[in-house]
Image (cartoon, grey):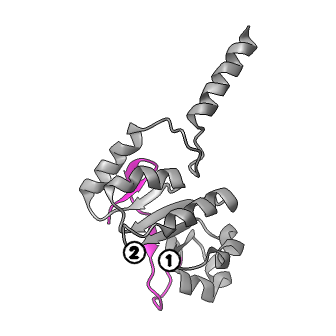
Amino acid sequence: MPLVKHGRIATDLFVHVADGAELPGDGAILVSAARFLEDPETLSRRAGRLGVIWPNHRDLDDLVPRLDRLAAVALVFPSFRDGRAYSQARLLRERHGFEGELRATGQVLRDQFVFLLRAGFDAFEVSKQSDAEAFANTVKRYSVFYQPTGDGRITALHRRMQLRHSESAGQ
């Protein structure tokens, strides 16, 4: 499955490890929420980066106390009509300060890419190579937004205010 990260098609460094499967000795892994919550201490002690696949019906309160152990959180879109993962992403970025990789996985469609970025996602598993290429191009298309959101970009209003402040400071 192609991965788009930071606006480019990228090699996925995370290996998806099925429940019950043996863990690799090192390297980056993604495990299910159930496996992660079963024994977060053991998973955190292994060599390599750790990520969790978090379903959108699961409460983030179970994950938040353990965010410091995670390099990545993959939020699941079981259907393109189900937007709960958008809310989870914004909460993780804005309320809980998660700075690791925030990955969208599942039914992610081309017309959702900009909204996913604005919600704070920075990596995307897509089903087709053509979607990955379209997304990489979409990232470059928009640079200014009016609404503040979880991606950390300043709004058009804040840009104008900064420009006015720097102009008045120069006089």
Q: Of helix, strand and loop, which one carries label 2?
A: loop
Left of 146 or right of it: where is 40? Answer: right
Above or below, 154 relative to 26: above
Circle 2: residue type:
Pro
Marks 2/1 in contact by CB < 8 Å: the verdict is yes
Percent x, y of residue 156 = 56, 33
Residue tagged by mark 2?
78
Percent x, y of residue 59 = 60, 78
| Nearest to N terminus: mark 2 or mark 1 | 1
Instruction: Name the residue at the bottom extreme.
Output: 20
Percent x, y of residue 58 = 56, 80
Q: Quick one: 39 or 45, which is closer to the camera?
A: 39
At x 68% / y 74%, what residue is drawn?
Answer: 66
Left of 152 or right of it: where is 96? Answer: right
Percent x, y of residue 29 = 50, 73
At x 49% / y 54%, what residue is drawn?
Answer: 122
Q: Assess disc 2: are there few (<14), some (14-19) or many (≥20) residues with their C-alpha within 10 Å of its C-alpha.
A: some
Above or below, 155 relative to 130: above
Residue tagged by mark 1?
55
Res. 57 visible in picture: yes
Q: Quick one: 8 or 116, which is closer to the camera?
A: 116
The segment highlighted magenta reads 1-25
Circle 1: residue type:
Pro
Residue 17 within the magenta-colored segment of the rendering: yes
Q: Quarter of the image holding residue 169? A: top right
